[in-house]
Amino acid sequence: MRQTIGYFGVYIGLGLFIASLGPTLPELAKNTGSHLDEISILFMARALGYLLGSLRIGKSYDRVPGHVLLAVVLFVISGMLFLSPIISQLWLLAIVMLIFGVGEGGIDVGGNTLLMWVHGRKVGSYMNGLHFFFGVGAFIAPILFAQTILYSGGIILGYWILAFFTIPIALWLIRTPAPTPPSRTAEEMKVPIDVLLVVLISAFYLFYVAAEASFGGWIFTYTKAMELGGPSNAAYLTSAFWGALTTGRLLGIPIASRFRPRTILIVDMIGSLVSVGIILIWPSSLIAIWVGTIGLGLALASLFPTMLLVAGRRMTLFGNVTRWFFVGAGLGGMILPWVIGQVFEDFGPQITMILIAFDLLLTLLIIIPIVRYPRASKTGIEIG
């Protein structure tokens, strides 16, 4: 249980890290003298780092003690958090965000993989719990920055609080024995690689994370641009999205034991499309933006852990396998948030919701062949 507590703490931190960029984007732009189309490069830099971290660090969990690796990554992220609000050059801040993203990718692959090694076939409720605690951190981050901006007039204090938060988590992991990778049988080694399934699941994570990162990263700026609220209200709306995601993942723990994963995936996708549709139909309504935001958070909540469960029922998830899912996630977090930044000022803030809706439709189209995919014997897939 000590191991699981450590992973939950890591994921509170991961939620704090990922949700910190959106509410602080205007201040970071001010610090670096950048426009929105320029500052959006931070999304791409961080997501590129996430992709690299998923590839390189993810592969290492099969070879080195996982907790030592996680702790080192947390210490590096702490340093990047300290530097982020005091940098005045955009190119230098982009490098910091790149390193930041490398750490986030390493944490995401490691946390999910290690948890599955600890709990095996009973991982379902723990997996939903892990992503629930991610939501806890993501819910707290916008509120934290709203309060620190009111208190200090800037974002430095908020970033430094996050920097110090990572240290006790890293120390906890160092003092906790790490699980070892599951051994593969000779029969599992002979099973041919199902590349198509890996590609489909990776594509799902690409489109899913694109939607989550784009909404969570741009809803603050969108709300201000649509004149639906000032900085504080926009921050609370951002927090409401992550809070709904958190609540949805908590509700997903009992739901996962009662409904089939394919049912959860399809219902959640329909809910996501309806929620964004509400925002698009009534763009000037404060009620609509709140209903759509909370609805989208609830609907997206179970998609990430549920798809991991689907993958785990069809293959043995070694670090060298799961890293490809997170590569897809990294690409999603890199591309769409950056694209929104490029077109936001030229086409108006509503282009944000149009692109997210289109992305969610593509996600649904990817899910359909995955849930209809034939169940196969457990495999240990080696790729790359």
Image (spheres, rainbow, N blue to C red):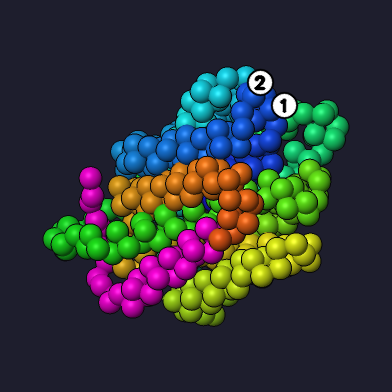
Q: Amino acid at mark 2?
A: Ile
Residue 177 location, x and y as percent?
Answer: 47, 40
CB within 8 Å, label 2 to label 1 = yes
Q: Which mark is residue 156?
A: 1
**Mark 2: secondary structure:** helix
372 is within the stretch colored magenta: yes
Q: CA distance from mark 2 to mark 1?
A: 7 Å
Relative to 190, residue 365 above or below: below
Query: From the viewer's perspective, is 199 left or right of 25?
Result: left
Read off the magenta span: 355-384
The residue positioned 44% from the left and 50% from the top of the image is 332
Secondary structure at badge 1 equals helix
Q: Quadrant of the C terminus?
A: top left
Residue 91 % position (x, y) = 51, 23
Which image quadrant is residue 90 in?
Answer: top right
- Identify which residue, 143 or 5, lies in the foreground: 143
